[in-house]
Amino acid sequence: MTVPKRCLAMLLAVTGCSRATPDAKPDVVVAKAEPVTVTAAPSASALPTTSRLRVVEADAEEGAASLIRTKRLEAKAEGRTLVVFVSATWCEPCKRFKAEIASGRLDARLGKTTLLAFDADRDGDRLGAAGYTFRFVPFVALPAANGSPAERFEAAGDGSEVWRPILTTLDRWQL
């Protein structure tokens, strides 16, 4: 196959190759590519994390309202939605929901959500003082700018799958 001279020169310049092909004529000028600086790929921790559902454990020492306001601003600055998430260690639907989160299967669906996780038994009083009252867990709430709940949803019913309707609510709350 014969390649026209100008195409060969362009091809070699674009690919950065300075080696002439066997059938190239001596009058073909091959442009040399400028040196390229190669940097290492960013580490996994340096990559943006907006594509994963993130869970942040609530600090047990700080007041719930101020913690929620702070975490909401941090999430917003990252282009994420903060959701208050309340569960309990003894709650089977909570365990199922957490297992689904840990598996990564919800990342594509809820990749811009950050769950601020509270324990119903440990944090119930301080959440109630901040306006986050609930009867059932798992419980999720979308905080307003002042830290109080703007919207809320709690799972109710029997069975380990009662957490699934929470997904519809979380879908709606995505940015």
Image: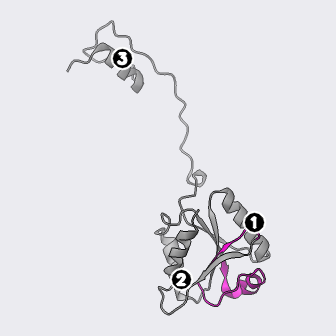
Q: Amino acid at mark 2?
A: Lys
Question: How far from the left and from the top, in percent, is residue 150?
Answer: 68, 74
Work out whether mark 2 precedes mark 1 in sequence or the reverse, and give the earlier one.
Answer: 1
Q: Label 1 belongs to which residue?
A: 70
Q: Image height check: is 168 above or below 73?
A: below
Q: Amino acid at mark 3?
A: Ala
Question: How far from the left and from the top, in percent, is residue 128?
Answer: 74, 85
Secondary element under disc 2, as helix, strand or loop, is helix
- The residue at 27%/15% (across/down) is 4
Colour setup of the view: one colour
Outermost residue toward the left in this view:
1
Q: Label 3 belongs to which residue?
A: 9
| First to last magenta residue range | 118-146
Question: How far from the left and from the top, in percent, is residue 111?
Answer: 54, 63
Packing grade of label 1 (10 A; few <14, some 14-19, many >=20) is: some
User: Which label sits in the foreground, 1 or 3?
Assistant: 1
Q: CA distance from mark 2 to mark 1?
A: 27 Å
Work out whether mark 1 precedes mark 3 in sequence or the reverse, and give the earlier one.
Answer: 3
User: Which label sits in the foreground, 2 or 1?
Assistant: 1
Asked whether 6 or 151 is in front, the reply is: 151
Looking at the rendered structure, which numbered label has been put on residue 134? none
Q: Quarter of the image holding residue 29? A: top left
Q: Label 2 belongs to which residue?
A: 95
Q: Image height check: is 144 above or below 39?
A: below
Membership of 43 in magenta stretch: no
Q: Amino acid at mark 1?
A: Thr
Is residue 139 in sight in this rendering?
A: no
Q: CA distance from mark 3 to mark 2?
A: 63 Å
Membership of 145 in magenta stretch: yes
Q: Quarter of the image holding residue 45? A: bottom right
Asked whether 49 or 168 is in front, the reply is: 168
